[in-house]
Amino acid sequence: MSELDAFRTEVREWLEANCPAEMREPIRDEDDVCWGGRNFKFKNAAQKAWLDACVAKGYTVPDWPKPYGGAGLTPEQTKILKQEMKRIKARSPLDSFGIWMLGPALLQFGTEEQKVHYLNPIARGEIRWCQGYSEPGSGSDLVSLQTFGEDKGDHWVVNGSKIWTSYADKADWIFCLVRTDKANKYQGITFMLFDMASKGVTTKPILLISGNSPFCETFFDDVEVPKTQFVGEINRGWDVAKYLLGHEREMISGGGAGGDMVSIGGAFAKAFGKNAAGELDDPILRAEMAAFDVDVFAYRAMGERFMDMWKTGRAHPASSNMMKYVGTELNKRRHELVMSGGGSEALEWDSEETKGGARARGWLRTKANSIEGGTSEVMLNVIAKRILDLPGA
Amino acid sequence: MPLYHNDDQAMLKDSVAPFVAEQAPVSHLRKLRDSADATGFSRDLWAQFTEMGLPGMLVPEAHGGLGMGHMEAGIVLEEIGRNLTPSPFLSTSVGAVVALAKAGGTQAGRWLPAIASGEAIVALAIDEGAKHRPDRIATTATRAGNGFRLDGKKSFVLHGHVADISIVAAKTDGGITLFAVPKDAKGVTADPRRLVDSSLASHVTLDGVEVDADAVIGEVDAGGEILDALLAATRTGAAAEMVGVGQGAMDMTVNYLKERKQFGKLIGEFQGLQHRAAHLYGEMEVARATVMKAQELLDQGSEGAKLMVSVAKAKAGRAANLAVREGVQMHGGIGMTDEYDIGLYMKRDRALAEYMGDVHYHIDQVARMNGY
């Protein structure tokens, strides 16, 4: 047996012993997701037990080094762990922007002290982070951001506001792009870290078309940030931000793949009824769902290839933009089909049977997929410029 | 296995890509076409393929081949696609080899070594009408004397007029049976037609063709499984070739965007074209990954291969079709001329898209395999 086969056996046994049955059920509601943080309330004992088991093993962040709370797994081992978790339909033990975004940035740009100090609480689910990037006047043109940190010797005084800050009202800390040099557009931004409980920070949830408020406006009113709390170099936060956007795109692009090889047509055939030939009885919708299934299965293969190449440094550094573009457009298409498949039932907004209009709200939520983290149009610009090397792009 | 080429596969690509580009670039296709070549490919080129060991790539080592897999065959097919190279590689070295190797027995022993040595060309006689409907084969094989009598009409048989044998799928009492039918068997007529991409595909008439019992490939009535393997291999191969066609068309088009000036600018500066080119890039990357996944699953003998093969044929079909359509459009007027190559890419794509089931057929298959 090869070393990897032995590892697979070991993982399989560990999962069998440690992943509670409840944690192998599909995610149904937002509170099935474990986000961690100071104020997180576990839905049940199984959710906590599963997190604790994974934390102890380093499996919340399996590919991070052990001193930072990970398990130090190789890309091949990480892939095996994910495959085995998927096989038993195990839920993610911990989701967070700390894992997906700040962590990779710190691993790349942080000092050793910062890595130990910030990564361990992320890995343990103790500190929940949010991301302060977009501003009311700086969306796609992010680098024009105006939130300003005035240099006061040993600290900055930050004033300004951010928008579309995901779960800012639930987060403990923020990683935030702050202008520290007004004369220099690209090299005048610092990537700061500070506590959301700091004096002068306020958040206001934004009501979206889905009727939910996952995003906030975040205001900074003379917020004091110690001048030790930044990543990379002062005024060179844009480098960190760009690196991190790559990871954000990688993360969002996962949405279209939808995890398993689950067929949308197969799922709806039961609800619709079938004709005598055993086919979904709306032939046009059947065709659209089948065409979508082809694209989603194909994208899943793309996701596998992308990760295999990304993790081993073979991928084009801008290819996460392609993944994000294709994946988010696919996810929007999925939800259009979910609404068509659901018919008038899917229109219900707050009935108990529809879990409070889950389909309608989910459909509307996906419209942000191709806006947040860089619009589809910006992704296409980046592909044209950095991958296809088209002129003047 | 990671979904990228390993070192050996990368080396194979590094030797095959320049070989095909030098020996059989698009001008090679033009030469055959303009000289009204009656064979459909160059036997000299096939001899060069043989020197490289390519015809027997998938032939098991015991039969004189290299015993490689679909991933390796795909590397060759992609280069064939990129250069629009006419060759019997897909039907002979992929489809026929997989069927014969799976079946084993007399026919495998007779033909696999001959394919590996470059001596034998094998055609696949599956389709019977204008569309690919392998579940509705009407050609019959009835027992007669020591063997069988074959009656029926086959269509879209690439290389059917020159192949040493055709693998014929026919209905027998208890199922489907595959036969190795020699070119010169009495009652076989191959009527070659020039297709839009300058290839030659035959309408083959089987009129009371008598074959011995040992012409059966595998077992009588048990040809369904062998046919499935043949189809899966050929579809995946066609998808790999389409990735090459699409990539070739896309590369040519992206280069053109960097050269052609209008309104005092390179047309590649216009965002309207940039976004379409970038979208195409994404589709081609997804198609390539999907084809590799299908190859991997076939090489592993995985149960999931059948679904992914249809996904790959459909996805590569869509992506390559987009590549050639955008290619002709973005080239503007010059793209409509015979002199410029982009139109040849469009033609080859159309033929490959139809071969062994088009996009619509395979999308429908994906629905069926998922129970709707």
Image (cartoon, rainbow, N blue to C red):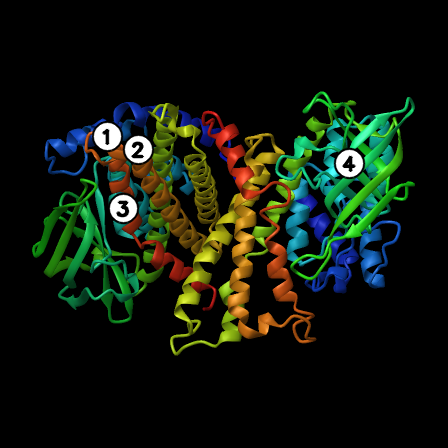
Q: Is residue B70 left or right of residue A317?
A: left
Could you tell me the amino acid type at mark 4? Cys
Could you tell me the amino acid type at mark 2? His
Disc 4 to disc 1, C-alpha distance? 53 Å
Q: Chain of mark 2?
A: B
Could you tell me the amino acid type at mark 1? Tyr
Label 1 SS: loop
User: Neighbour class for label 1 at 10 Å: few (<14), some, many (≥20)?
Assistant: few
Could you tell me the amino acid type at mark 3? Arg
Q: Nearer the viewer, residue B347 or B184?
A: B347
Of the numbered discs 2 and 3, the one sitting upstream in the chain is 2
Mark 3 = which residue? B350
Disc 1 to disc 3, C-alpha distance? 17 Å
Mark 4 = which residue? A176
Q: Chain of mark 3?
A: B
Q: Is residue A297 left or right of residue A176?
A: left
Q: Find residue A268 and report its horizontal and vertical position in percent.
A: 52, 69
